[in-house]
Image: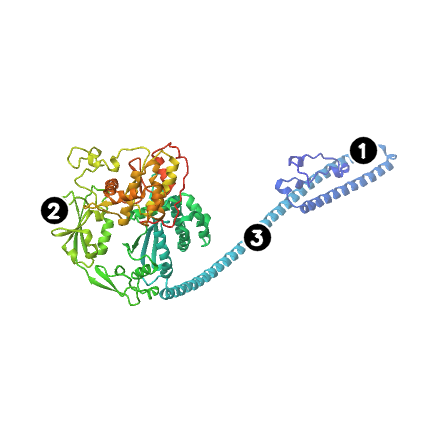
Amino acid sequence: MVEKRNKKDDFDFEFKDVDELEDEDIETPLDEVTDESDSEEPIEEEAVEESEEDQAEKETKEESKEEETEKSEEEEKEDESEDEEEPEEEEKKQKKERKEEYKKEKKHEEKKEYKKEHKMENKQEKSEKKEFKHNFKHKHKEEKHRKHEEKNNKKEEKKKSYKIKIKKKTFYRALWAIGIIILLIAVIALVVKFKPGIGGNYGKAKLDFYIMSQCPYGTQVEDAIGPVLDKLGNSVDFSINFIASENADGTFQSLHGQNEVNEDIRQLCIIKYYPDTYMKYILCQNKDATNVETNWQSCASSNGIDTAKIKACFDGTEGKALLSESIKKSTAIKASGSPTMYLNDQLYSGGRDSTSFQRALCMKLSNHPACKDIPQCAADSDCTAEAGKIGKCESPNTKDAKCSYVDDARVNLIVLTDKRCTECDTDSVMQINNQYFPNLVTKYVDYNTTEGKQLYQKYGLTYLPAYMFDNNINKTARYAQLAQFFDKKTDSYILRADAVGSTFDPNGEICTNNIDDNGDSLIDCADPKCKETTECRPEIKKKLDLFIMSQCPYGTKALDSMKEVLSTFNGSVTFNVNYIASENADGTFQSLHGQNEVNEDMRELCAMKYYPTKYKYMDYIWCRNKDISSTEWESCATSNGMDAAKIKACAEGTEGKALLSNNIKLANSLSIGASPTWMTNNRYQFSGLDANTIKTNYCQYNAGLKGCEKTLNSTVTGSNITCG
């Protein structure tokens, strides 16, 4: 590379005699002194510049040689003439020196001028080259940019062309897809029209089940409806909700214990994530509903259900939220018995077999192919298609069966209730009234109005709600079926209070409103009439009461669970059994399961009276519960060391009647009618069947008792569990 030099250095020459000039004395040409941009020029250009400088040096050397030659010739001449003329020689010598001096100076000036001109030429040439190079690069860049622009333009045109092609293809494909969809819709429409179980033009029927997942009556109707849903398919809007209760701490209680709660949650999770196959899982579980904790995974897996997904739903908050919402729906329609069923939002009371369900649903559909061979009716209760008319089934349950309808009498009904009564439910009674008397015209009157008090006085009423029908009731087609539940007044027929569960006394003290309702200057619990109400009962620690019907399967299971509870607390609990029944004016009794239940109530009370020590009477009860419907009871008494004759004499005489009359007062005063119902510490009610649920609720109000730390059996086994 050429060494860089300052411009100042380019002009620091030491001029010598031409003859004394050497190659190294010739300074580097000016064009070697460049700025940074010049140093980057190609080596080839520098080589050209150096060759020109060499040529100038050669010319200078030649001139110097010529001078030296001339000088030597002159010296020779001088030597020759020295001898001849000394003086002249001296003069000539001086002239010659002056001449040489002049010549030397002149040559030096010429040389200097030549170098200067040569450098200027080189500099100009270099500048021209640099300018040419710059112009060449600029043009090259312009050409390159132009080609790049052309290339980009071609690409853009190509892209535009491609997009246009894609749009065209997409458009044609969309048209093709729309055509296919239209064709598929047409095909589906034809399938829906002619294939059973798909829905479509047949209308829609709505069927809602409110059940307990381990209740045999509930599983029975599920098993019956399963094949019907397969036949009618989407023509039926079917739903399942569960009957249970939610505690303040976010836990749940159900009649058949914690295992039932668990299964409720699992089924709701499966219903949410597998709406098309959940019934297959439920039908699988129903084959052994009491062992759901051990067989649910196999039932799920065999029906293509992801057990991990269901377990995550069950273990997390999602499952609890689903059950909470389901319970709210059951509570909203006041479902307490399993199953409670609604067809098109009307209480269903027809048959519980598949044929009855299919028939009832087909009555709500229009020409569904699956309904073609179903007998139109099996009983009068199947004939409900024409609103406001009474249906009668002719040739029931045959291929010729048909419903005929007649107009029914118009009946006016006054329902007298009291807005202060928080437990006065009229909905369930009115559902039955509307079912039996389709042309009811109903009016609601509050007791606290002038009209209400006049009606109360006119008909000599005691308890509310009261249902007062006009005389046209006896002209209706179905009055005879319910006549035994009516009291005839001058211009009305009134449903008996005991028949509809009316227990509210509007003239009595309401024990929770801080008002003297009956004018005796005693408010709420200070009034003796409130003494036996739940709110006013004094708390008695370590006390546990059970309210049952002796032949109610729920009641028998609750009693069976007490064997483990009594053993756990061993003297730390005072246990009492209270029966649910009603006493007639003639001293006889009525109970839900008939006279045999009344008789068993009295036998068990007699056993309690004569064998109370260490709950010995419970041995008799546990023995009877193995076959509670049997009339052969003596063996259970004698096998447990009891005098059967003594118990018989008590139960069949006045003693047994007196015991039952006194025993049922507590349930009636508390308005308890569900079997079983528990009450701990004389005032806190709860429900449940299994030992662990009983223990948990008992310990909630008796904390610290020995035995509360234990986990008891939380399952209720046996095929005779029913739901009333």
Q: Secondary structure at mark 1?
A: helix
User: Does the CB distance between marks 1 and 3 fall below 8 Å?
Assistant: no
Residue at mark 2 to residue at mark 1: CA–CA distance: 183 Å
The kind of residue tagged 2 is Lys
Label 1, residues with CA under 10 Å away: few <14, some 14-19, many ≥20 = few
Which numbered mark, 1 or 3, is in the foreground of this view? 3
Secondary structure category for the residue under label 3:
helix
Which residue bears the numbered disc 1?
Answer: 91
- Mark with earlier residue (3, 2): 3
Label annotation for residue 144: 3
Q: Position of residue 245 (x, y in %)?
A: 33, 43
Tell me how many marks there are: 3
Residue located at (40% from left, 48% from top)? 290
Q: Residues within 10 Å of mark 2 (few under 14, many from 20)?
A: few
Provide residue 240's location: percent of width, then percent of height.
35, 52
- Relative height, residue 519 to residue 398 (above, below): above
Q: Which residue is identified by label 2?
A: 458
Q: Nearer the viewer, mark 3 or mark 2?
A: 2
